[in-house]
Image (cartoon, rainbow, N blue to C red):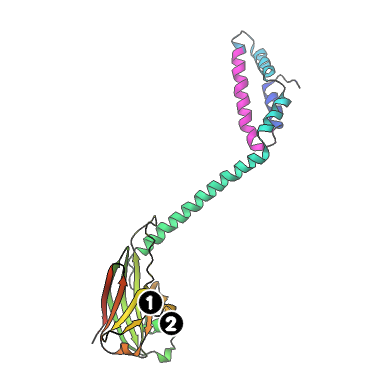
Amino acid sequence: MSVNSKDDFINCVVKQVKFPFDRKPIAKELEDHIDQLESFFLSTKCSPDEAQRKAVLEMGDPLEVGKSLNDVHKPLLGWLWIFNKYLCILIAIYSSILFMTKVYTTWENSRERTPPVFEGESAFQSIGIDPVEIQIVYDKTIYQKIDLHCETILFERILLNSDGTMILLYQSIKEFDPFGLDVSEYPIQNMSTLVHSNRRKIRFNPERVKALEGHRILVTQDESLLEGEIVLEFSHHIGVSRITIKGE
């Protein structure tokens, strides 16, 4: 097939390429190559029309050129490349969202929040105690901290019901760690022990650990809590920390 016009040649070639996203760069490459040949023929004193005609003829049969290019730019490989490209973009966006979420969550966890204001009865109701059985015998606001590795436990309030059920309200404040370099988690309900003044240890009940108005609570029950001094004792890799939370 013979064509004389540069545009006709390029259009004929790209029509043979089945993968549509490759047609534009192929057309640009053909145009640049023809322009170079045109410049060469113009330097040999050819007229512009004659230079373009010779340049197009030098390129060969457009149908054959198009078929050869189509063999190289296979549609399946092209679509796979497009798919991988956008997949990488989606992964990058998703990773950015996860990272920003991690930064925000870490920042939130690193903030010390104002203790919530609530009626003591609501704390006991939140763990399933019938309102008629609630008779608070001890209610004290506290502000005591235990510093653990990359985490601070801040105790804020202690409530004791007449049946020996005790609730301890606390915050877990993490150090600001946006890259998640320290992922240590302290299961405070499992590592915490109440030590009565008679040295008898009373474990918190992990199944009754709750969250209350954005804070966390520890729950235990024992009638011996109604008398004497109560000490909250933490055993952790740094050592043992104790906080006196009740005493006569």
Report the magenta residues as a range.
17-40
Q: Residue at x 67, y 30 (%)?
A: 69
Q: Residue at x 27, y 77 (%)?
A: 142
Residue type (three-letter) at the residue carrying disc 1: Ile
How far apart are the two marked residues, 2 and 1, measured between alpha carbons?
A: 10 Å
Q: Main secondary structure of the magenta part?
A: helix
Query: Is the residue 205 above or below the residue 93 in the image?
Result: below
Out of 176 and 230, give the one closest to the viewer: 230
Location of residue 173 in the rendering, given as x and y in whole percent from the top left corner: 34, 66
Which quarter of the rendering shows the C terminus? bottom left
Mark 1: give few (<14), some (14-19) or many (20+) Cα within 10 Å: many
Residue found farthest to the top? 45
Residue found farthest to the left? 248
**Mark identifier at residue 217:** 1
**Mark identifier at residue 127:** 2
Q: Secondary structure at mark 2?
A: loop
In the displayed structure image, the side of residue 85 where residue 170 appears, left or right: left
Location of residue 25 in the rendering, given as x and y in whole percent from the top left corner: 61, 31
Location of residue 67 in the rendering, given as x and y in whole percent from the top left corner: 71, 29
